[in-house]
Amino acid sequence: MPENSFKWKHYAGEIILLNVRWYLKYPLSYRNLKEMMAERGIEVDHTTIMRWVHQYSPEIEKKVRKHLKPTNDSWKMDETYIKVKGEWKYLYRAVDSNGNTIDFMLSAKRNKKAAKRFLKKALGSKHTQIPRAITVDKNPAYPPAINKLKNDRILPQNVNIRQIKYLNNMIEQVRQEAVSEIADQSVLFPFRVFLL
């Protein structure tokens, strides 16, 4: 990060980035980080750490995204209903057959429009390949969304849609880990799962 990113801050850039990195990588609260810093002789308030996370996370995400592992061409997609900041949302998530995260998105609705938006977002990631097969659960919104993307020439016509529940076992396992981590946190940042 450029040195001027920390201009007028009361703490060194290394301390700020260390706190932001720990918050994003591990299931720690702001108060946990405050205690950890106090153990190291650095007095910082938990709300200051929260401001650092809000300020520097988007910039870190931009830098981290280009270093993500390339995914393969077999995608598994699913969604689940989770509570974020007191509101129920759908967490759309896609992984490849090796379990590497392709992308994920929060949505208020579980419909064709949300499924299409998520697919376009996943296809736009630089670390992904165009899928040869997309395995989805029995959600009826996926086939029309995928067909619409095929008609719009965003997805090739030869992409195979497999709507079989048991083939999505891998994403169910990964989802359980992600949901439990998200449930433990009060704030969801879109790249927290990428850093796990």
Image (cartoon, helix red, strand yellow):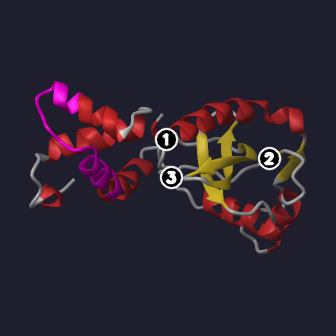
The residue range painted magenta reads 36-54
Mark 2 or mark 3, whichever is nearer to me: 3
Mark 1 or mark 2, whichever is nearer to me: 1
Gap in Å between the C-alphas at discs 1 and 2?
A: 33 Å
Looking at the picture, how far across and down is residue 18, in whole percent?
Answer: 24, 38
Look at the image and say whether residue 52 sits in the magenta stretch: yes
Please, what is the three-letter code of the amino acid marked with disc 3? Pro
Look at the image and say whether residue 134 sits in the magenta stretch: no
Q: Residue at x 87, y 65 (%)?
A: 144
Gap in Å between the C-alphas at discs 2 and 3?
A: 25 Å
What secondary structure is found at the residue carrying circle 2?
strand
N-terminal of the pair, mark 1 or mark 2, is 2
Q: Residue furthest top?
A: 39
Contact, CB < 8 Å: mark 2 with mark 3?
no
Mark 3 or mark 1, whichever is nearer to me: 1
Q: Quadrant of residue 55?
A: bottom left
The mark found on residue 133 in the picture is 2
Secondary structure mostly seen in magenta is helix
Look at mark 3 in the image and give the residue it sits on. Answer: 190
Look at mark 1 in the image and give the residue it sits on. Answer: 185
Crowd class of label 3 (few under 14; some 14 to 19; many from 20; radius 10 Å): some
Looking at the picture, how far across and down is residue 73, in whole percent?
Answer: 70, 44
Please, what is the three-letter code of the amino acid marked with disc 2? Ala
Crowd class of label 1 (few under 14; some 14 to 19; many from 20; radius 10 Å): some
Against 69, is 113 above or below? Answer: below
* Between 62 and 104, the one nearer to me in the picture: 104
Q: Residue at x 11, y 46 (%)?
A: 12
What secondary structure is found at the residue carrying circle 1?
loop
